[in-house]
Amino acid sequence: MVDDAAMEGSAITKNPAGGDEDKSSPSHTFERYSLPVRDAPDLHSTPSRFKVSVDRVGLAKLLFKEVFHYRFNMGLVLSRPCIYGVFGGPLGGFAPREHECVGCLRCTIEHPEIVKVEPNPLRWGWGDDFHNPLALDTVDHESRSGSVPVRGQGYRGKFGGAGWDGMWTDMSEIVRPTRDGIHGRESISTLVDLGGSPPLVDPDDLPDTPTLSLPLPTFLDLPPAQSQQIDLPEIWHRAAAMTKGMAFLPVRTVLEKGCPTTHIAPFFSSGEEHLCASFHGTRLVEAESLETALALQRALPQSVVSLRMPYPEDPTELVRLFQKGIRLFHLVADFHGIGPQGRFVLDLIQESHCALVSEGIRDQCSLIGTGGILLAEHTAKAILCGLDAVALDTALSIAIHGRPPGGFGGRDTRYSFPHIPVDWAAQRITNLLSAWRDQLLEIMGAMGLREIRRMRGEMGRALFQSILEKEAFSDIEGFPE
Amino acid sequence: MTLISLKALKHRGNLNKGLRWWPEGNYGDHPALGDARWTPDLIMAGWEMAGTGKPPVAVINHQTGASEGGFDRLTFKEGTQKKKGIIDLSLRLNRREPRLDQMRIGLPWYGGGMSYGSVSDQVMAARALAAKSHKTLTCTGEGGYPPSMIPYADHVITQVATGLFGVSEETIQRAPILEFKYAQGAKPGLGGHLLGDKSTSEVAKMRESVPWVSLFSPFPFHSVYSVEDHRKHIDWLRTVNPDALISVKVSTPSDVDMVAVGSYYAGAHIVHLDGSYGGTGAAPEIAKKNIAMPIELAIPKVHKHLKKEGIRDEITLIASGGIRSAMDIAKSIALGADGVVLGTLDLIALGCTRCSNCERGRGCTFGLTTTDPELSLLVREEWGAERISNLYKALATQLENLLRSHGLSSISELRGRIDLLRYQGGSL
């Protein structure tokens, strides 16, 4: 086995044939995994969060009155009720700087007859129910700074709700993963192993099943369709390399660009398996259909082969595919996390995981999920429910200012991007993944876990609103049966 | 007077007027105020109560928020009785150790920990003065014991948290109650966090740390691995101050019921559950929504389990984390708590708009969660104490009215009375 500490530092394949091993980080040297975070400011300004309207006549009257009231003490007269600089421009309140407003409302509490502060409909009208303005703001913040969003005061949203909002993660009062905090000398591992593994290991006869180890449980899914000619594949490739992760790209794109596949997983549509000749030693390939996947397994025995498929209506379908030889499933829902029969991925993931558990084959295969993963907490919750890793879709596009003009529809939705430099965009995605990793560490630290592999399918550490409400309120009159 | 003092005077006057005018509705709606948990009505009801000392009249819905769950799904059935006489709102904190004072506080709530550094000295002193006037308590939080609190020592809980900031034998000996903070509801499992900008020279001195450097309280206690270790911790405090009651503040994990039982057997007099939707001076957004359960779900779980274990009447169960109104207090008690802890509501009384910028730069623009020497002048100790005191009076009046209407003569009779509640609306 390859040492975890060494694996932490580098994306190294446990590939019996060697293949694409990352030579830059020898396995005998400990290198702590970290992501190269750097500020990547927004390229265009977003609408301000608030609209500040000032009654200029009223303000002039107030100033005139205060000049005499305070006996020409102009320092006092011009003392503003804002510490954020909204009225700090040369014209003060006559030309408020709305972009500086944080919505504290002190100005309008002090002078309700003169100042009014309202949420800016341009800002709060973004997105849809799932890709809501707060979520988009969060992704923007994370990709801009690479930092975890920290704010004062408590939670501001709904009590719970459908989907991810109806689930909380557990914590422990006394168990801790490390001796000196989640960012201390002992590290919490976010390393995942993907692919097949045998039910029992005979030390004298080690299996040659290829597996893939990545330092983050986060893939970059296929780039979206776009209206312009932004070089998304290059951005994906660059970001995957910076994060030592993997990006899925269409196989023809990979061939056209001729880029190395250390951090790229070529995706083969049905009938494209004949293109695999150039990919011997590639760590991961993905197929659109079972036939293509089996053909790739035969042609590329050293590669992990993933089957991309919709979340199955009947989760035992995964068991049947396992029996046919599939060891890595990439399950896909729509951008909102909705799968077959309009069901959300939270349930679909659990069903898929449990179907494999009940057959005793869960540890012999892996699950990647795409769709409905927009925020860091969604990754943690998806893994708790049973995924090994996630592949991101809309979050990546949002991070680099991509917006679908008609809303976040199906996977054929065309995105609109401003002109974006490749380096900047790769940095934004790297920042996003770094912020998400830090948040994974926070959640794992709270649970007392020091390996993300142990978090997979740990449903005993998941708190579901429906169950807890029943426990708490079922004795109360009016509680629904 | 200096220019800074004059400016503070000017803005204090303006803020006072605004806090009075807004609830009266003279300036229309305020769409930028509030959120699903703390609606504009709930915030303005807090301002109105703090101004008048009476139950809100101007604000229409001062009982529930718009979160569509928890307290906002529960209502009290209409009471038909008119109980006469005095209603007893007092709360006994010591239920297990006759040797010690039973310690009754005048109200079924006390003030939650807010450290020096996360809030100003003036705010701490105002809360302590209000606590004294209502024969209840407030708490130091984890930031030391500022000298301004010493005159109110009989009403101040000393918090012992994981960073042990400002904890000394002297502050332990001074306190009637010692509170072990294992976790905080708003950031369960993450420890405390004071951003560098707020760690001024005075704050750092109190915490025996370096000025302008961010301070993290580790999580969890690095000397507690088990209930036995917890017992050892309690023994340590009781050696230093044998007369103090011990409170254990924990978050709300899935095994919170077992944690409560463990705390009892370790020797605690009070178990304080801090739910996940409570307040904080700074916390990762991911923690506030996603880790541990809201207090509404934890109270019945713990109450029922303590009863099953046969120890319910030997320990005081206190709830906090999102208590916004008199009805939230009553619902908590009806669900099984003995009393509650208030934090954000105290700050609302002082003008907080819950804008969530507590941690930003110089801190709160209303002079609450700040140690900035200029901003903190916006709150005077006496003014703050009067507003919090008014709030407490208004809350008490509403509780008394509720108890009378249900024929109850004391708040302790309300405990566990889920038969008085009704669940409204659907579930998932």
Image: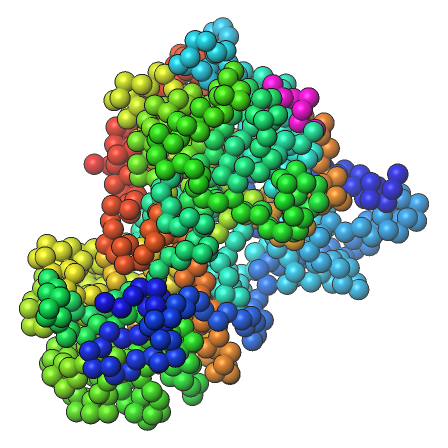
Of residues B146 and A226, the one drawn nearer to the viewer in this rendering: B146
Give the residue furthest to the right: A71
Q: Is residue A322 above or below residue A479?
A: below
Q: Is residue A296 magenta?
A: no
Report the predominant secondary structure element of the magenta stretch: helix
Of residues A475 and B144, the one drawn nearer to the viewer in this rendering: B144
Q: Quadrant of residue A232?
A: bottom left
Q: How is the image coloured?
A: rainbow
Q: Is residue A42 above or below residue A480?
A: below
The image shows residue A208 at horizontal and vertical percentages of 14, 75
Q: Is residue A46 above or below residue B141?
A: below
Residue A221 in view of the camera = no
Q: Quadrant of residue A99?
A: bottom right
Q: Is residue B155 magenta?
A: yes
- Apparent side of residue B186 relative to residue A251 in the rendered image (left or right): right
What residue is shown at x 20% (from left), y 70% (from top)? A195
Quarter of the figure with the C terminus of chain A: top left
What residue is shown at x 42% (from left), y 48% (from top)? A179
What residue is shown at x 30% (from left), y 92% (from top)? A255
What residue is shown at x 89% (from left), y 44% (from top)? A70
Q: Quadrant of residue A455?
A: bottom left
The image shows residue B421 at horizontal and vertical percentages of 34, 26
Of residues B57 and A117, the one drawn nearer to the viewer in this rendering: A117
The image shows residue B289 at horizontal and vertical percentages of 42, 48
Q: Which residues are magenta?
A: B148-156
- Apparent side of residue A14 relative to residue A184 in the rendered image (left or right): left
- Apparent side of residue A347 relative to residue B159 in the rendered image (left or right): left
| Label tally | 0
Of residues B172 and A323, the one drawn nearer to the viewer in this rendering: B172
Residue A189 in view of the camera = yes
The image shows residue A256 at horizontal and vertical percentages of 32, 93
Quarter of the figure with the N terminus of chain A: bottom left
